[in-house]
Amino acid sequence: MKRNYLVLGIALLGMAVAVVAQDPAPKPAPKKAAAAKGSATKGKELFDQKCGICHFADSDAKKIGPGLKGISKRGTFTVNNNKVTDDNLKTWIENGDALMPPFKDVLEEQQIRDVIAYVKTL
């Protein structure tokens, strides 16, 4: 009788291992990475509301501030010749300068990432 229980136990254990091996737990999608990059669509809306007052999106001509068309292709900012990178854009948007107001108290972190994603498409 004990032998039958032992064989049954081993058989059940083997089946359980086989089932677990066939059906691995699904891995969650990396949502944070997508959010960290920002949405150009949302960024356009924010740009039109907050930035378009001073900056052209479809021209590199100066409005109040410089036009931003092709800023990623230019490679540098026109006012200080710093490289155009996500970090530099973020710093610029957050802190502004003598001619541009800071937006760190106006826009949330994700909104700034969205604006950066949009500006990079210009």
Image (tube, grey):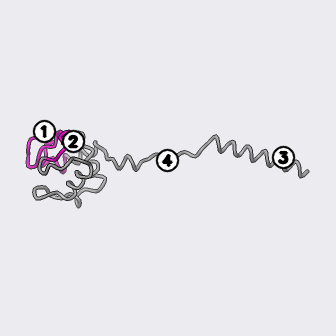
Disc number for residue 59: 1
Look at mark 4 in the image and give the residue it sits on.
28
Tag 2 secondary structure? helix
Density class for disc 3 (Cα within 10 Å; few <14, some 14-19, many ≥20) is few
Q: Main secondary structure of the magenta part?
A: loop
For the C terminus, the quadrant is top left
What segment is highlighted magenta in the picture? 48-77
Q: Amino acid at mark 4?
A: Pro
Give the label, 2 or 3, closer to the camera.
2
Query: Residue shown at 31%/53% (left/top)?
Result: 110
Q: Is residue 62 magenta?
A: yes
Which comes sooner in the sequence, label 1 or label 4? 4
Q: Position of residue 104 (x, y in %)?
A: 23, 59
Q: Amino acid at mark 1?
A: Ser
Which comes sooner in the sequence, label 1 or label 3? 3
Total numbered circles: 4
Tag 1 secondary structure? loop
Give the label, 4 or 2, closer to the camera.
2
Query: Residue shown at 11%/46% (left/top)?
Result: 66
Which comes sooner in the sequence, label 2 or label 3? 3
Q: CA distance from mark 2 to mark 1?
A: 13 Å
Q: Position of residue 34 (x, y in %)?
A: 37, 46
Look at mark 3 in the image and give the residue it sits on.
7
Give the label, 2 or 1, closer to the camera.
2
Q: Position of residue 60 (x, y in %)?
A: 12, 40
Tell me, yes or no, whether the two marked residues, 1 and 4, touch with CB atoms within 8 Å. Answer: no
Tell me, yes or no, whether the two marked residues, 2 and 1, touch with CB atoms within 8 Å. Answer: no
Look at mark 2 in the image and give the residue it sits on.
72
Density class for disc 4 (Cα within 10 Å; few <14, some 14-19, many ≥20) is few
Q: Amino acid at mark 2?
A: Ser
Which comes sooner in the sequence, label 4 or label 2? 4
